[in-house]
Amino acid sequence: MAFFQTPPTLGNQFSDDRVLRSYLARVVPDDVMRAVLPELDALGALSGGELYAMQLRDRLRVPELTQWDPWGQRIDHIEVTDLWKRAAVIAATHGVVGAAYEPAHGAFARVDQFARVYLFHPSTDVYSCPLAMTDGAAKTLLAHGNRALIDRAVPRLTSRDPERAWTSGQWMTERTGGSDVGLSETVARNVDGQWRLWGTKWFTSATTSQMALTLGRPEGNGAGGRGLALFYVETRDAQGRMNGLSVNRLKDKLGTRKVPTAELTLDGAPATPVVGLSDGVRAISPMLNVTRTWNAMCAVSSMRRAVALARDYARRRVAFGAPLAKKPLHADTLAGLQSEFEAGFHLAFRAAELLGREEHGALEGHEAELLRVITPLAKLTTGRQAVAVASEALEAFGGAGYVEDTGLPTLLRDAQVLSIWEGTTNVLSLDVLRALGKGEPLRAIAAEVRALTAKIEDPRLAAVGAQCRAAVERASAFAMELVTRAARSADEATGALSELEAHARRMSLTLGRALAGALLVRHAQWSLTAENDGRARAAACRFAQHGIDLLGLAAPLDESDALANDTAL
Ligand code: MFK
């Protein structure tokens, strides 16, 4: 009989996930766990079952923009895919945003919510994108205390009723700048007591949302981010017509192809200032920090999906006389992927824990400084990991990983955006420098890594812990030396600061990997003791082998080496 390969399959994505279950067992109190377990189990079943099947079936469909109705009216209707419609209902009913804002579980609300995000994301064709922005919008409106906007939008943004639930856009990117938002050209004018916006937004993700937070420059304001103001916009009027804006076209993208990303023209769109009429970049930063946390969580959940499929396939695929899973080299490759995923997992969930603690006034010790810096660190570290893991996971399928109708190439397409949107790796590394400020957050990272690795009994884990501590100490000493040189004189400042900037990415990845490694070490020790399970330890040791200190300071520092090369301008 002819041979046909059985494809990889997925089971319940909650009950199959040793890493998530073990983490929750350590962190979440029993009563909270009992309450959320049925929801997580239901989402796990949907994610590995109905939604995954739909995702494979729906593979070729993309959103469609209809700009005009048959009678010539401009309608700009975007028809999303069936999976997106289903995902919207599931997201609302299962509280994928809402759970974060419900009081029942106090500071654990964010861990609960992000466990839902983690289960939901990889089977929903990146419906997590509008949800991330929705969460970010709710957080930002609440942070600024604009009562009218809070009353109007937050109950909808956090609703569990699919009929009532809204999503929000985050329109920041213009032709002048995706990273340098201060270059934005959108103008805000007060016309007869109503603020209105004129301009072009070059990338607006999920343009089907009912509202958006966006930036515009009130006439007469100065240049840069300080001259921008944060505005609230509703996309359609009471009759369902576009509200002073039009969709020029949908973007043709490498991945996230189900996300209707559009170019928009704002032509007098009515807008409400959220908080004052300047400092828009600072005002939108709560949104950025929430969407970056989502980005990290979706990165780890996409790594988990890639590894789950590759492991399942390795049990089914026979080559050279045995299943791939029994082949030492293949098993070794998968172990490497698993270790990156596990370390990234603990980093992303630590960011979620801290966010929840901040929102419930429960931050202690160094945690406030840590939260500010762990957010970009988690985003940039897991974003790079997700791209590398997706690429390697495809290779684990051989040619099948390169064939579109297996659905596997989508893993790589969709991972690639994770290190681009919400700030590229380099821009996030500069945000880390911004967050490090005068050094308190560096001390917070060092304190966290020391605390995590202080009481490790297992000798192999203790050695990994020591590697993490050494990496943080070296990165801190390096940064502080440059900051000290910069403070010494104006002459030294230029060179020292540009050297710091040139190393910012390596330094951020070092700090991110050291934190991730230390978090994994602490969890692995707990898992050895409480669960008699050595798998997290195996992951920690393997993660450390991949390298934690990426600063590359083995050779003596020389600023001219850092900057002088063929690409210097
Ligand atoms: C699957 C998951 C889905 C995730 C959702 C996907 C949706 C995708 C939608 C998008 O991609 S939307 C576009 C996202 N765009 C960005 O993320 C922009 C990237 N660029 C940056 O982040 C730049 O660093 C930045 C625009 C912030 C630089 O602007 P400026 O004007 O040069 O900033 P500046 O002057 O350094 O900071 C202005 C203020 O904001 C300062 O406060 P003060 O006024 O008090 O001094 C900063 O401290 C503050 N700030 C900036 N970033 C902050 C922050 N505060 C807290 N947290 C931050 N992250």
Image (cartoon, rainbow, N blue to C red):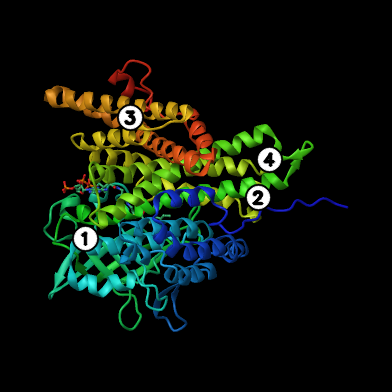
- Dot 2: element: loop
Residues 460 and 528: in front is 528
Q: CA separation, marks 2 and 3?
A: 42 Å
Q: CA separation, marks 2 and 4?
A: 22 Å
The mark that comes first in sequence, 2 or 3, is 2
Disc assigned to residue 143: 1
Indicate the position of residue 29 as horizontal and vertical percent values.
39, 55
Q: Which residue type carries mark 1?
A: Ala
- Dot 3: element: helix
Q: Is residue 504 above or below residue 37?
A: above
Q: Which residue type carries mark 2?
A: Val
| Residue carrying label 2 | 403
Relative to residue 124, is residue 188 drawn left or right?
Answer: left
Q: Residue furthest right?
A: 1
Where, by quadrant of the figure, is residue 457 drawn?
top left
Q: CA separation, marks 4 and 3?
A: 36 Å
Indicate the position of residue 168 as horizontal and vertical percent values.
34, 66
| Residue carrying label 3 | 472
Density class for disc 3 (Cα within 10 Å; few <14, some 14-19, many ≥20) is many
| Residue carrying label 4 | 325
Where, by quadrant of the figure, is residue 435 drawn?
top left
The mark that comes first in sequence, 1 or 3, is 1
Density class for disc 1 (Cα within 10 Å; few <14, some 14-19, many ≥20) is some
Q: Is residue 180 visible?
A: yes
**Which quarter shows the C terminus?**
top left
- Dot 4: element: helix
